[in-house]
Image: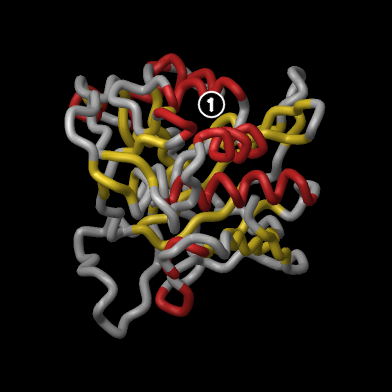
Amino acid sequence: MPDYTFSAPHKPLLQQGEKVVWPTEGVTLRYSADSLEEVAEIFHTTVENIKELNPDWQDNYSRNGGRYWGLKVQAEPYTVPENNVVTVTVNAPWVESYYDRTEVSDVPASLDKQARAALASAYYFQYHWFGMHAGFMPFESVEGLPGWLQGYATDGAFYTKFSEFSSFLHTVYSDAWIDDMLNMDPTPFAEGESDTILTIDGDRGSNIAYCGHVFTEPELQPDGSLTFYQVVLTCENEDFAGWAGEETIVPDTATVTTVRLVPTENGWRVDALELPN
């Protein structure tokens, strides 16, 4: 497992630093979901109200992804929460790439230390191996593998033995999350011969309008899970021209995504988490 260091609790700081001004006047609140009924239930409103708030709601539906994207969910401005966070540094010193060796993430301060480590580990894994980049590097290419698999991970990768990789996953994620990832079509990772890890190799871009993210306060649910929202702040103003200028940016939109931790005999495990950008 990686090493961890934890800061003291502190107020959240937006990830773009001094470039971003805190949106004191409130922002537009948005949510993406599989159905309008889901949105109405979560935000305690009606489908008719969601349609009124989103005259173009039909255009927001992606047939490819099967979701409604970025639906406005309330008419009044949303006040961005300022709940305390803890900064967690995750370090895997055996990783060859300096860029991939460390990740620094803020997580809710009200989580216990084990839950903080699990959530920070999930951010680390998803940013470096299952999000911005997908797959382990370095790897040795192998021809004729199924799907998008390119080869097997070699020394310097996050893991080279599937048994150790599986142990990491089961220390961080719920069984259901792991099953979903390893059974995706196409699958990003698979067990190869002699305990090797077959891996894909891919990259994606990020949202240039991203200003940072904060969290609502974790709440214990009747099923024993901890659930809260990741509040992703962006600048959707048509005048926004990127980060090269000297002017400061005020986020105008907050898109919330669900974060869920489930209890196990050995501590909390991440069951739902999307990267904020």
Neighbourhood count class around disc 1 (C-alpha, 10 Å): few under 14, some 14–19, many 20 upward: some
Q: Position of residue 179 (x, y in %)?
A: 50, 21
Identify the image's colour scheme: rainbow, by chain, secondary structure or one colour: secondary structure
Horizontal relation, residue 236 to residue 116: left or right = left
* Of 273 and 37, the residue lying toward us: 273
* Of 137 and 171, the residue lying toward us: 137
> Which residue is found at the position 27% from the left and 45% from the top?
201
* Of 130 and 67, the residue lying toward us: 130
Would you identify the image quadrant in which residue 260 lies? top right
Horizontal relation, residue 85 to residue 207: left or right = right
For residue 94, above or below residue 160: below
> Which residue is found at the position 44% from the left and 58% from the top?
156
Q: Position of residue 114 (x, y in %)?
A: 76, 46
Marker count (numbered)? 1
For residue 263, above or below residue 155: above
> Which residue is found at the position 50% from the left and 63% from the top?
101
Q: Which amino acid type is shown beneath numbered disc 1?
A: Trp
Disc 1 target residue:
177
Horizontal relation, residue 219 to residue 36: left or right = right
For residue 206, above or below residue 226: below
Would you identify the image quadrant in which residue 89 lies? bottom right
Horizontal relation, residue 151 to residue 251: left or right = left
Would you identify the image quadrant in which residue 170 lies? top right
Q: Position of residue 87 (x, y in %)?
A: 65, 64
Q: Position of residue 130 (x, y in %)?
A: 40, 42
Secondary structure type for disc 1: helix
